[in-house]
Image (spheres, rainbow, N blue to C red):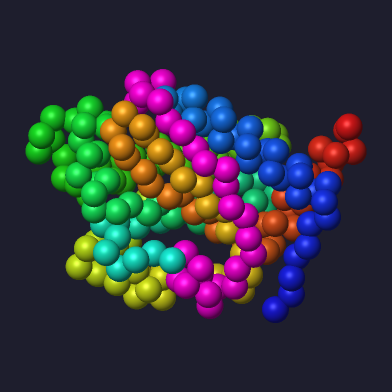
């Protein structure tokens, strides 16, 4: 297994791209949901595919994990995982403005996951003159299922990935969820090339 290493300037540039995307995504989400949305500073680390389940630290009590692939130009791609806890899934109808029993909890979770994923990644892509397309979101887990089994069932086709974890907080509804981006090594190499072009312009 090879390792990718970003130099300090590349790391700072990637962090800034993510921070700007978070800020704009937070504003767009706040307007859409008509409430304040707070995004914590993301954690960024390198993980191996064999350790993904452990590094995500998803408890088996998680109400849901929704997975959605994303694909851009120049080989930029990855997988977004949205992780919800039971106490938060009960607040989705109020958060999204649905009437009681209008949609199942699973449909509400998939709906919100698509909004969170595409809002952030579209803003991120626009900063690097790219454009994202998305696979259909997949509902991976419920209170009665084991997240590890789902990870094995939906095997990620890479040995090494960059993991970006962003926590969304909707303060008016005491709602939290984690968005975890897994970007394979080959895509990071391509992103690094884009970052180098950005740095050359300054």
Q: As drawn, is 153 to the left or to the right of 3?
A: left
Q: As drawn, is 183 to the left or to the right of 54?
A: right
Residue 2 spot, x, y in % from top left: 74, 75
The span picked out in magenta is: 31-56
Residue 116, quarter of the rendered image: top left
Outermost residue to the left: 101
Residue 69 spot, x, y in % from top left: 48, 53
Q: Please check the rendered image and state whether residue 130 is part of the magenta-colored stretch, yes or no.
A: no
Quadrant location, the C terminus? top right
Q: Is residue 99 visible?
A: yes
Q: Residue sitting at 31 percent across and 29 percent down? A: 172
In this rendering, the answer to whether 37 lies above or below 137 is above
Q: As drawn, is 103 to the left or to the right of 196?
A: left
Q: Is residue 139 visible?
A: no
Residue 6, quarter of the rendered image: bottom right
Q: Of residues 172 and 12, which is closer to you in this image?
A: 172
In this rendering, the answer to whether 78 lies above or below 88 is below
- Count how many numbered circles sit on residues in the image: 0
Q: Residue sitting at 13 percent across and 30 percent down? A: 99
Quadrant location, the N terminus? bottom right
Q: Please check the rendered image and state whether residue 50 is part of the magenta-colored stretch, yes or no.
A: yes
Q: Residue sitting at 16 percent across and 45 percent down? A: 104
Residue 23 spot, x, y in % from top left: 57, 30
In this rendering, the answer to whether 124 lies above or below 156 is above
């Amino acid at each position: 297994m090879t390792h990718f290493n970003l130099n300090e300037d590349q790391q700072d540039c990637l962090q800034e791209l993510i921070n700007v995307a978070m800020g704009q995504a937070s504003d767009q989400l706040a307007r859409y949901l008509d409430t304040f949305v707070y995004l914590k500073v993301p954690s960024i680390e390198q993980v191996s595919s064999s350790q993904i389940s452990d590094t995500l630290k998803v408890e088996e009590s998680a109400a849901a994990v929704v997975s959605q692939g994303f694909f851009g130009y120049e080989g930029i791609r990855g997988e977004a995982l949205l992780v919800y806890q039971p106490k938060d899934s009960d607040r989705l109808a109020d958060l999204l403005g649905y009437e009681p029993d209008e949609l199942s909890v699973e449909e509400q979770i998939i709906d919100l996951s698509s909004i969170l994923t595409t809002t952030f990644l579209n803003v991120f892509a626009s900063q690097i003159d790219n454009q994202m397309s998305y696979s259909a979101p997949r509902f991976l887990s419920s209170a009665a299922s084991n997240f590890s089994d789902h990870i094995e069932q939906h095997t990620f086709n890479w040995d090494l990935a960059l993991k970006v974890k962003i926590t969304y907080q909707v303060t008016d509804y005491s709602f939290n969820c984690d968005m975890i981006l897994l970007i394979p090594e080959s895509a990071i190499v391509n992103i690094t090339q884009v970052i180098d072009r950005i740095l050359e312009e300054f």
